[in-house]
Amino acid sequence: MTTVALSAYILMWPVVVAVVLFVISRAFFREWAEARRNGRGLI
Amino acid sequence: MDGVETAQFSAVVVVGLLVFFYGGTFLISTRIGKKDENADGYMTGGNNIGFGISAASMTATWIWASSMYASATSGYTYGISGPIHYGLWGALMILFIYPFGKRIRAVAPKAHTLAEVMYVRHGRSSQLMLAGSNIVGSLISLMSNFIAGGVLISLLSPFNFTQGVFAVAAGVLLYTLWSGFRASVLTDFVQVVAMLGAVAVIVPFIFFAAGFPAAFETGAGNLTPQQGDFFSSDAFMQQGAPYIAAVLAYAIGNQTIAQRLFAVKQSLIKPTFVTATIGYGAMVIGVGMLGVLALYLGFEPAGGDLNNLIPGMAAEYLPTALLAVFFIMIIGALSSTADSDLSALSSIMMADVYGQNVAGKEKADPRTMLLIGRITMVLATAAAVAFASLQLSILDLLVFVGALWGALVFPVLASFYWEKVTGRAFTTSVLVALAVFLPVRFGWISVDGPFGIVVDVLSVIGIGVVLGLMAFGFFGAGVAKIVGVLATLVSAPFAIGSLHEYATLCGSLVAYSVSTVICWAMSAGQKERFDFAVIAQRTGDFDDGSAARAARDDAGAAVPRQAADTGTGAPDRAGDARTGAPGRAGDADGEPEPAARK
């Protein structure tokens, strides 16, 4: 592998992690807001 | 750990970080705490949890401290493909089991444990096999996570290993004890944010701080040709292949996963599992890349212990603030799995031991169940702390539990799809598979002679079983049979004669193949057919049982008595047998299944 390819290979995982973190967090806060609107518990 | 204690934090800072983390999670758990907890909520959170929490919880539970250490070790040992052969296969197993998860929820929408379903399907022996394997597996996992916490704290602070173990154990128990599974999944969200956020920052930071990408060229000489090869056969045969076989078994057999499967809203199973697949894979592979960087740098872990690799890299290249973030990341990883283990253990004792085998489902008192669940958590924590000091071989114990679950995979899955599978076939196939696994895995019989060929043939069949099961979940029985047969035929010429040299891989594969062949052979000729609708009737909520109603009556709630005759309101075709009480509807050994058969 070239240096550029190796760098991309190493650094792509933190980027994917950040995307998943965004997706999960957005869903969580939407569910939280909806639960509060409906006056029920989150779980 | 002798000689490697390098205090990076003062005692005050470490205590502050632990109070911040465990105090914070405890405060969060108090937000959902109820004075009168509900037994079903304590086990599954009401079977209606949304995508955000369930995806976070599935991701956090599947990631444990050992998975990060092992992924980095794999990168350090096998080179650039090493983390892939740890993290990718572990992640894909979450993906591969979601079709099975959908089927399991369709058959048993309100169940709490897989063992509970097996009790209805086959009777006590199958239930106890699953429950017993999970008790052992969760205790080992709990112990392993406490050990990881003790090692981390002893490495990065003036505190010793024992003090670290006690601090982590007390912290996890503090926030899990009262609300059980509900606290576990809610705090999983915070823990997953800490873990994923830390990886997103720490891996790039170390990458640049350690002098990459230039170090790829200066350190290239530190890699062997196999370590520098993305398609390394060493990495696949030594790490990837055994792991594929092992984690499929873990994903199917492990109650921590099953518990989340029963908790998530049924329509959200697929997105939850897909997100957890990507989250787990990226996180664990990302951390594993620190091992690859260490290999290029020629970094030597303290004391030659590979478990010190990640903490060592962090201590070497991270500033104090990010080292604190790293500390929280590891504590979050081990705590999220430890609280899941506590919840799994308490559910098994509540539902499988007390609910099904002691009181009987209809007579089970939810208040007693809650008490049993909490006592279980305290005792399990104490046992895990005690075992942590014994320095048992965690790897050997995990291999054994993995093989037990490997032997269970086909019988368990077949029991959800194939109405011909009997309790006798289930039990016999698992026991024989274990009897064959043990001499193969631990080399009790020489594999140099004919036994080696037998092992190879069984292992090749095992390859077909593993790949066939994966295909079955997505494409059905027809495609699965083709994939299974093709996999067996294609691998046979390469594997027979040499595969027995890989004892770990062969051990898992023979467990799969033997249990599958025997279970199939004993079930195929059966005339009796199981009615899957019975499972939903017998695995309903405990808080709807007559004991729960009596308790509510005692408390002054006006509940019509006739409701007690119909339980959850589901048609009671099996009559008294729906309680699952041994001896009522079943045969002499307490097996309830005849009542469930047409």
Image (cartoon, coloured by chain):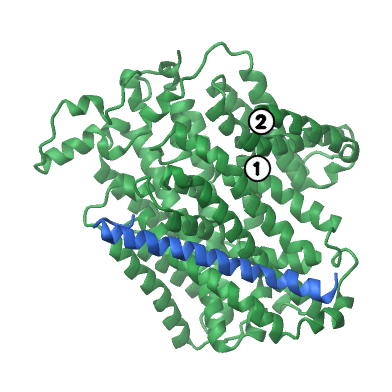
Chain colours: A blue, B green
Q: Can residue B374 be seen in this view?
A: yes
Q: Residue B549 in the image: x percent, y percent?
A: 19, 36
Counting residues from the N terminus, which is met first, the one under dot 2 or under dot 1? Answer: 1
Q: Which amino acid does label 2 sit on?
A: Ser
Point 27% across, 42% down: residue:
B366
Q: Is residue B146 visible?
A: no
Q: Residue B26 in the image: x percent, y percent?
A: 35, 68
The answer to whether residue B558 is above or below residue B225 is above
Q: Quadrant of the C terminus of chain B?
A: top left
Q: Name the residue under label 1.
A: B403
Point 59% across, 79% down: residue:
B155
The chain containing the residue under callout 1 comes to B
Left or right placement of residue B569 versus residue B211 in this view:
left
Q: What residue type is labelled 1?
A: Ala
The chain containing the residue under callout 2 comes to B
Q: Within the image, what quadrant is residue B65 found in?
A: bottom right
Q: What element carries label 1?
A: helix
Point 75% across, 29% down: residue:
B482
Q: Residue B470 in the image: x percent, y percent?
A: 66, 39
B97 or A28, nearer to the observer: A28
Left or right placement of residue B76 versus residue B395 in this view:
right
Q: Are marks 2 and 1 in contact (CB under 8 Å)?
A: no
Left or right placement of residue B432 versus residue A29 in this view:
right
Q: Is mark 2 on a helix, strand or loop?
A: helix
Point 32% across, 48% down: residue:
B41
Residue lying farthest top? B527
Q: Mark 2 to mark 1: distance in Å?
A: 11 Å
Packing grade of label 2 (10 A; few <14, some 14-19, many >=20) is many
Q: Mark 2 points at which residue?
A: B515
Q: Within the image, what quadrant is residue B117 found in?
A: top left
